[in-house]
Amino acid sequence: MDEACPSNKSGPVNLRYFTTRKNRHNSGWQLSLESLFKFRNLQTLHFRYPYLSVYSLSISRLDLPPEIWKMTQLRHVQLEAIVKLPDPPRAEVEGENSVVVLEYLQTLSWIYDFRCTVEVLKRIPNLKKLGIYYDGSVFWGYHCLNNLVYLDKLEALKCFFYGESPSFLKNVTFPESLKKLTLVNGYIPWEDISIVGSLPNLQVLKLKGYAFDGQEWEPNEGEFLQLKFLLLENINLKYWRASSIHFPKLERLFIKSCRHLEEIPSSIGEITTLQHIEVHDGRGSLVTSAKEIQETQQSYGNDDLQIRILGIIYSTGWLDASDSFEERDNRSTI
């Protein structure tokens, strides 16, 4: 069943907002895309998949038509499927002085095999939210991800890897403007997380589904100085050797389905800004450590720290509604 919602009643010529919802397969979505891009006033395009998961994302492949580079009014392109962004027209074809810039475009996801070339960047200079997807082994030099640093208005980045990509962080340069980062899969070694920890404005970090690989994570002092929200989900971490000096501004900590993690370090409770710890589907010692942190803080007169313990969460994958750029759950997002 499809549901389309235009933003006005003046007919399709002036269509500015289009959303469609698929309950099963994405048959017909490609045709919808091709027909929609003739509406030059289109501002928002949202294809919704109500049960977004690692599986639905990987089978929902679409190709954006070349006309996207002429849609000067576009603000948000959010497709809950992976889409291939076509190469922009070459300058010698369209003329040096006729390069069309999508100056209003703020949201773009999920882009399959995203290449951060100069030709692409100069057309999307004001992008704030980007979701990218890579499948299998990748030659990172071809994708030019060191150029990502030039998207100096980018605030939120979501990266999904369908397979191991351990060298990703060594081949990308993040802009200092980045405030929210989500990594899913990848099997990146924990020693590379310092690249993330050094981001000066990072406030939200979500690590899902073996984003990092290894049993031990020992953060370095002087990193994650602005981090307020941390999610660890389905990570094969066993020993987390952290203390209050490593996350000095942390407010909310979520640990989901980390079945190997022994405990939350007791000194995490000493972070003066910490308000909430939530544990889903954790081993007994992990749950006990969370409760002990709360008891210790209460003995010091701190009754504000909230601890929430939940059982097994049944999920079809490591992507869910919270991975939409439109955050829906205020309890688990900032």
Image (cartoon, rainbow, N blue to C red):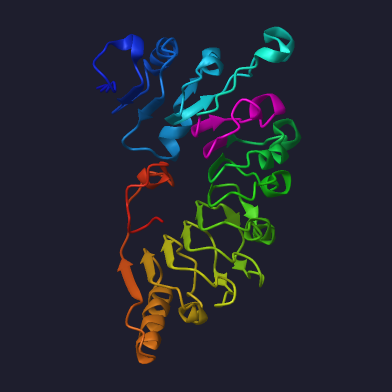
Relative depth, front residue between 327 and 59: 327
Residue pictured at 35% horizontal, 89% vertical: 301
Relative depth, front residue between 150 and 112: 150
Residue at the farthest bottom position: 299
Percent of width and height locating residue 26: 37, 22
Percent of width and height locating residue 131: 52, 38
User: Which quadrant is home to the C terminus?
Assistant: bottom left
Specify whether residue 118 is painted magenta.
yes
Q: In this view, does 250 lie to the left or right of 123?
A: left
User: Which quadrant is home to the N terminus?
Assistant: top left
Magenta-drawn segment: 105-133
Q: Is residue 26 above or below residue 126?
A: above
Question: Is residue 90 something that shows in the picture?
Answer: no
Q: Is residue 167 above or below residue 134?
A: below
Specify whether residue 259 is painted magenta.
no
Percent of width and height locating residue 95: 70, 10
Q: In this view, does 301 lie above or below 94?
A: below
